[in-house]
């Protein structure tokens, strides 16, 4: 009876399970085929096509070791009782039915049916970095994979992807040494940040999206880290507040057509972009930051005007290639201290008409502080302005004194008579000043028909013997204007009015 039962069980076909797998051209898939632990020593294989005509793509009896045949890899993890299949370099033509099989010598093989569908995707891309710099790799994904777990790892350790750096459900940066990963679910974008690049970091990497416990898909990239000495790794700069700073960053020939940018590191693994330039030999302005790209000299020139202590920090000059990755080439450490008490130079608003870069050295990336130069020029300009102001002040003082002297001379001349004997001057009556006459002596001259009045100067404090008298003659001719002949010390002068002012 037991013999019949055993024969009957051996005749039952192996249990068949089915997995639906979706991958993308240029990338690959990872398929997990589970088995019962009693089959740990059995041969494992992977074949394509209908079961009856399924042709092996790979077959092995090796345990806990990765085996490769062309673009298919098989790893039999006997501890977990699962063998892992990896298919790389997918093409649209790879869409088909496949089987994971376990060879059983006395029974039908156990198998798992796999339906693979390959969608159009990105091809393997090359990402370039530079020794001492950093790189951010962007990977766009479909919205349906928003909440899927994501990994970043070297391709050579693909079978151990569950142990590598990965995202979590929270939208935060996750770190593992120099490698960091961030899942921006609002933008359906996965970002990988690698700092302090070294030539040993060069190699093939994969970005893995774990869809389920049965399968994952991944995209591949090739990272090339150069150490050709084209560019400086780090530059430190000190400046004084309110000065201007010029920075010249060199980039390799291979990035002539890429967009150049300047960013400021605002966190451990975040660099906030300040400004960028895509055209050659044209200034781009962003607040106090001015960027100028020169493809011929392979230079990115950055100028920061009127720096303050708030501008102190870590900056990076870099390039961005078709929105898929960003290369941080030169690190700039800027420290702004103190305050500049000099008069601000009117040249602080330059760049409005500049069409050439401030720094065009071609030997290597260079950064220059214009602090000493700016101080000298500011001092020279300030002294020049002060000297000009002093000169103008002296000139105005001389002109004012000259005008004042002229005015005083005119006033004095108006109070002194320059009219000679026999000369007459007509003065308007409203300009006449009179003094009260206290001593009047009247004499009539019958020969001339004139009356003469002798008047004592009422403001004189001299004795009568020293007195001088004025002789006033009144003419009564109706056709002549009233005239007064003023006679003093035997000199006669004719006046219309007599005005006596004391200076």
Image (cartoon, rainbow, N blue to C red):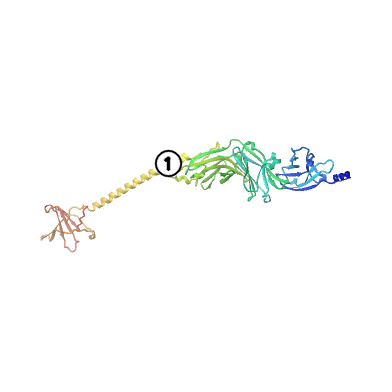
Within 10 angstroms of label 1, few (less than 14), some, or many (20 or more) residues?
A: some
Q: Quadrant of residue 257?
A: top right
Tally of numbered discs? 1
Q: Can you give x and y, in whole percent of width and height, for residue 106 in the image?
A: 85, 41
Q: Nearer the viewer, residue 22 or 494?
A: 22
141 sits left or right of 375 in the view: right
Q: Is residue 366 visible?
A: no
Q: Can you give x and y, in whole percent of width and height, for residue 16 in the image?
A: 80, 47
Q: Is residue 150 visible?
A: yes
Q: Quadrant of the N terminus?
A: top right
Q: Nearer the viewer, residue 216 or 56?
A: 216
Q: Can you give x and y, in whole percent of width and height, for residue 409 in the image?
A: 26, 50
Q: Quadrant of residue 5?
A: top right
Secondary structure beneath label 1:
helix
Residue matched to label 1 = 379
Residue placed farthest to the front in the image?
1
355 sits left or right of 91 in the view: left
Residue placed farthest to the bottom in the image?
478
38 sits left or right of 376 in the view: right
Residue placed farthest to the left in the image?
446
Q: Nearer the viewer, residue 378 or 54?
A: 54
Q: Can you give x and y, in whole percent of width and height, for residue 344 in the image?
A: 44, 45
């Amino acid at each position: 009876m037991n013999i019949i039962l055993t024969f009957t069980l051996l005749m039952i076909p192996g249990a068949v399970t089915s997995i639906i797998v979706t991958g993308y051209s240029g990338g690959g898939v990872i398929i997990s085929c589970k088995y019962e632990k009693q089959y740990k020593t059995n041969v494992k294989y992977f074949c394509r096509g209908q079961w009856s005509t399924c042709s092996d793509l790979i077959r092995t009896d090796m345990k806990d070791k990765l085996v490769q045949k062309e673009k298919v890899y098989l790893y039999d993890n006997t501890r977990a009782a699962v063998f892992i299949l990896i298919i790389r370099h997918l093409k649209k033509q790879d869409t088909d039915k496949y089987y994971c099989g376990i060879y059983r010598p006395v029974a039908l093989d156990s198998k798992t049916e796999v339906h693979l569908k390959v969608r159009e995707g990105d091809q393997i891309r090359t990402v370039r970095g530079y020794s001492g710099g950093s790189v951010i790799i962007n990977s766009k994904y479909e919205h349906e994979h928003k909440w899927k777990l994501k990994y970043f790892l070297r391709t050579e350790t693909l079978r151990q992807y569950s142990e590598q750096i990965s995202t979590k459900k929270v939208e935060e940066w996750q770190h593992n040494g120099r490698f960091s990963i961030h899942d921006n679910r609002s933008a359906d974008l996965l970002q990988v940040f690698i700092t302090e690049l070294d030539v040993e970091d060069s190699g093939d990497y994969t970005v893995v999206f774990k869809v389920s416990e049965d399968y994952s898909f991944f995209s591949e990239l090739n990272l090339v880290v150069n150490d050709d000495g084209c560019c400086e790794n780090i530059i430190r700069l000190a400046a004084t507040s309110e000065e201007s700073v010029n920075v010249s960053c060199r980039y390799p020939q291979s990035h002539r057509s890429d967009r150049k940018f300047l960013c400021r590191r605002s966190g451990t693994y975040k660099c906030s972009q300040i400004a960028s330039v895509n055209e050659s030999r044209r200034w781009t302005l962003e607040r106090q930051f001015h960027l100028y790209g020169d493809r011929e000299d392979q230079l990115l020139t950055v100028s920061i005007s009127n720096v303050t202590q708030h501008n102190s920090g870590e900056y990076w000059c870099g390039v961005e290639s078709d929105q898929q990755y960003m290369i941080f080439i030169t690190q700039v450490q800027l420290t702004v201290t103190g305050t500049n008490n000099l008069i601000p130079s009117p040249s602080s608003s330059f760049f409005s008409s500049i069409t050439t870069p401030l720094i065009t050295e071609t030997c290597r990336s260079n950064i220059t502080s214009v602090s000493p130069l700016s101080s000298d020029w500011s001092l020279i300009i300030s002294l020049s302005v002060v000297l000009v102001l002093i000169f103008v002040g002296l000139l105005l003082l001389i002109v004012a004194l000259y005008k004042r002297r002229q005015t005083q001379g005119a006033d004095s001349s108006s109070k002194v008579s320059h009219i000679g004997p026999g000369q007459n001057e007509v003065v308007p009556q409203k300009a006449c000043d009179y003094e009260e006459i206290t001593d009047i002596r009247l004499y009539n001259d019958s020969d001339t028909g004139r009356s003469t009045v002798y008047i004592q100067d009422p403001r004189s404090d001299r004795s009568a013997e020293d007195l001088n008298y004025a002789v006033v003659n009144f003419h009564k001719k109706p056709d002549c204007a009233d005239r007064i002949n003023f006679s003093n010390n035997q000199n006669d002068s004719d006046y219309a009015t007599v005005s006596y002012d004391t200076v």
